[in-house]
Amino acid sequence: MKLLSFDTPTNDKSSEELIQWINGTLHSKINAVIATHFHDDSLGGLQAFHIHNIPSYSYSKTIELAKENHFVVPESGFNDFLTLNVGNEKVIAKFFGEGHTKDNSVVYFPKEKILFGGCLLKELEAGKGYLGDANVPAWSATVEKVKREYPDVKIVVPGHGEYGDRRLLDYTINLFKSE
């Protein structure tokens, strides 16, 4: 089975454990990792993936911010979007605008109608979380663009917390709308 990882654990030790579990327990191989933004909960364990020769991708601004902050840098970047094939399926990583960070991207599985929103999207009833690198005034508009682009999404996975349906998009939009 071929797999993609969206984001890494926060450190190399945890990433190594994840890679070993996928290889050993699932008898699968990670074909690539996509970092959705430059924080450690997205690329903190990236070096472990590189040691295993797993290709890494991110939005070009993520690479820039990783370099500025002296973090491990994803190997390949994209400007607006990236389409990767996983077996017979395609996955689309795309930047829609600023929100949680200046570089947050999302990943969409068109066939399964699953959206991985990273830290741009919040679980239901979540608070606003860390805002130190956020563009709070732009956040709602960015999520509204995601919602328009993927009107048929069925499952939404936030960067933290429980997955859900399209209500996570609306919840996130409303959470930051008053800002």
Image (cartoon, rainbow, N blue to C red):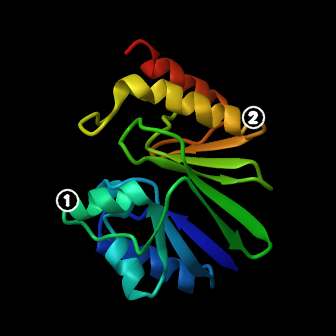
Q: Quadrant of the C terminus?
A: top left
Q: Which residue is mark 1?
A: 69
| Within-10-Å neighbours for mark 2: few <14, some 14–19, many 20+ | few
Picture coordinates of residue 88, whole percent (x, y): 80, 73
- Foreground of the two, 32 or 62: 62
Mark drawn on residue 27: none
Residue 15: quadrant of the picture = bottom left
Identity, as a three-letter code, of the amino acid under mark 1: Asn
Query: Taking 71 as reference, is 120 above or below it?
Result: above
Taking depth in this image into account, of 6 and 104 the one nearest to the observer is 104
- For the point 39% across and 82% down, the residue is 50
Residue 102 vertical placement versus 174 (above, below): below
* Residue in view at x 56 percent, y 78 percent: 30
Is residue 125 visible from the viewing direction of this image? no
Note whether 137 is above or below 80 in the view shown. Answer: above
Q: Residue at x 67, y 78 (%)?
A: 2
> Which residue corresponds to the image point at 49% horizontal and 49% vertical from the top-left?
105
Amino acid type of the residue that numbered disc 2 sits on in the rendered structure = Pro
Q: In whole angstroms, how far apart are the C-alphas of marks 2 and 1?
A: 36 Å
Q: Is residue 98 visible?
A: yes
**Mark 2 or 1, nearer chain start:** 1
Q: Residues within 10 Å of mark 1 (few under 14, many from 20)?
A: few
Quarter in which the N terminus is drawn: bottom right
- Return the mark for residue 151: 2
Q: Residue furthest top?
A: 178
User: Of residues 76 and 20, which is closer to you in this image?
Assistant: 76
- Asked whether, in this view, residue 71 is left or right of residue 2, the answer is left
